[in-house]
Amino acid sequence: MIIRKSIEEIEIMREAGRIVAQTLEAIKRAVKPEISTIKLDKIAEDFITKKGAKPAFKGYRGFPAAICVSINEGVVHGIPSCRRLKEGDIISIDIGVEYRGFHGDAAITLPVGRVSSEASRLIEIAKKALQMGISRCVVGNHLYDISHAIQTVAEKAGYSVVREFVGHGIGRSMHEDPQIPNYGHPGKGPRLEEGMVFALEPMVNAGGHEVEVLPDKWGVVTRDRSLSAHFEHTVAITKVGPLVLTSL
């Protein structure tokens, strides 16, 4: 069942989303060669806590950190560690926040210093795929109109979208119905209605779409070890169009 949110509830989620966006901005300023990912996690947790919110990922199904960090071939759910970033890496940061009983969730992929043209293009295409998905979050559209828009952007650029992991509804719970694949046929799935709130999150691989889970049972990487980029926003469907809740 897709839970629709009231205007008042969406406003609280807007506050949660703003904290997520502000945290990502703090992370952007910190990302550079030689910084460890555990240091980025500390920066994020301290920032979220000072804002009166909770890092929603920490403890979720046993996840040990406030943020997920996935480097290069990493797709999602990477655990922060002592690993230090290197010039030319790309790093995906996924942050979830709980505030006044509601959640916000967003992700970005960042270059570390100067990166290859291939990596830059992948990041831009993944970002564009998210933007196109958001543009389909319109009352009366079908759910898979979003999925199809994301898939089209990625595959037209010669990339693939991850199929084992998907976007999701969000609200009082971090993960609510429906699941939102990053592929599918337009005109399928439930009709979009005012008050629905989704976390759209295209995961775009430079190579094949297949992935595998690391021995730590959390980190997900591309099976062919090609680069991967991940972007996410929490978006409310309103009668005047999509409202991105995780923007500044």
Image (tube, rainbow, N blue to C red):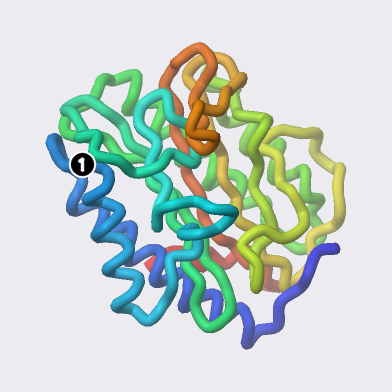
Residue at 66% x, 37% y: name it.
Answer: 182
x and y, in percent, of residue 122 in the image: 41, 27
Q: Name the outermost residue toward the bottom.
A: 8
Give how far across and how far down residue 28 sits, in percent: 25, 51
Three-letter code for the amino acid on which mark 1 is drawn = Ser
Identified at 70% across, 83% down, the residue is: 6
**Can residue 124 be seen?**
yes
Query: x, y percentage for residue 196?
Result: 72, 67
* In this view, 50 is above or below 65: below
Which image quarter holds the C terminus?
Answer: bottom left
In the image, residue 121 above or below residue 2: above
Location of the N terminus (image quadrant): bottom right
Look at the image and tell me whether residue 241 can be seen: no
Q: Nearer the viewer, residue 171 or 54?
A: 54
Element under label 1? loop
| Residue 43 or residue 198, whichever sits in front | 43
Q: Vertically, is 18 above or below 227? A: below
Q: Which residue is mark 1?
A: 36
